[in-house]
Image (tube, rainbow, N blue to C red):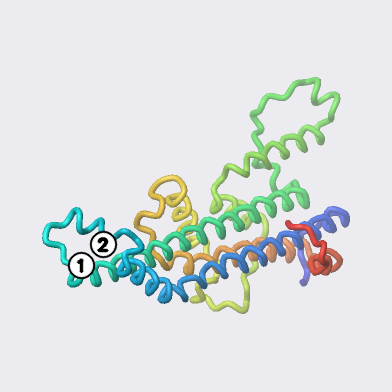
Amino acid sequence: MGDSPYTADPETVRRASVRCTELFKRIMVSEAQVSSALQVPDILGALKDNVIRTHMAGESGLRELLSGVLIGFDPAKDLPGMAARFADLTALNIETVISGAVVVFSHSTADDVFTEVCWLAIDLDRNRWVKLINKDRQVSLRSVVEMGEAKVVEAELGSYKNELKSASLPCRAKLLFERVPIILNKKLPADSPRHFDEYKLKEADELRHGLVHRNGLSGLAPDSGDKFMGFLHEAAQTALRSLAHAYRFSLDNETFTSFFSPKSPAV
């Protein structure tokens, strides 16, 4: 991977390699799962036909409902158009629900990976992160005497790791790439929808926040899943790639090959 000013003890690097390999599997499995979900809209035509059939056959209760609330409702004349409209709405709702789920699950994968890569980066080189700990936190003299300064700092870094979990995904990405040089995927052109960009990461994070905490699915574009699924998984890969490049390690071969064992555990 070339020369690098980043160094760490071999055992810490080995553990980072193993964990990054496990995270790599997490990303692969996640993308395969959500990609499968995005295939559902391809069969919505058949679903719409079936919805129309159930409405026209009186199996859905739509005919009786409309007859009871609409004066002058003529099933023979009015029901076909309304059935088709309801079928369109059903298909749109399915696309929207799937799109929202894809955004949330893809974001969850990227979120977890960036958290763990930040933790690994701290373990690999604490000096690059120690300035971020709260130096005004009160520490007892007993702790300093009994633990020593190095152990006290280590404990504070442990607390900082926990605090990182509450930071936003763009914030963690910024913290990481300020300390670990970002390595983009050279095979992706700048105009690729998967190409990593911190502004798009913020957009994805705000979209997910709105879905979960504010608007739900209201106003969500049905193509949001397609727009952000590949991008968020590539963002997670970018975090792994950058850390591995900085500390000159690759995926752990033994861990990687174990994934293909019939008894391979979930990550």
Mark number displayed over residue 75: 1
Q: Is residue 144 above or below residue 128?
A: above
Q: Residue at x 37, y 64 (%)?
A: 90
- Residue visible at 54% across and 53% down in the picture: 170
Q: Secondary structure at mark 1?
A: helix
Q: Residue at x 77, y 38 (%)?
A: 154
What is the three-letter code of the residue carrying label 2? Arg
**Tag 1 and tag 2, C-beta contact below 8 Å:** yes
Quarter of the image where the N terminus is located: bottom right
134 or 234, which lies in front? 234
The percent position of residue 83, horizontal first and vertical second, equals 28, 68
Residue 101, numbered label: none
Q: For residue 255, what is the image quadrant?
A: bottom right
Q: CA distance from mark 1 to mark 2?
A: 7 Å
Q: Position of residue 63 (x, y in %)?
A: 26, 62
Could you tell whether 101 is left or right of 214 in the image? right
Task: Specify whether residue 252 is in view.
Answer: no
The image quarter containing residue 91 is bottom left
Q: Earlier in the sequence, mark 1 or mark 2?
A: 2
Numbered disc 2: secondary structure? helix
Furthest residue toward left:
72
Q: Give neighbour class at mark 2: few <14, some 14-19, many 20+ (Cα, 10 Å).
A: many
Horizontal and vertical percent position of residue 227: 47, 68
- Residue 87 is situated, as x and y percent measured from the top left of the image, at 34, 68
In the rendered view, would you say 126 is above or below 251? above
- Label 1: how many Cα within 10 Å (few below 14, some 14–19, many 20+): some
Q: Which mark is residue 63?
A: 2
Res. 142 in view: yes
- Nearest the viewer among 217 and 44 is 44
Q: Quadrant of the C terminus?
A: bottom right
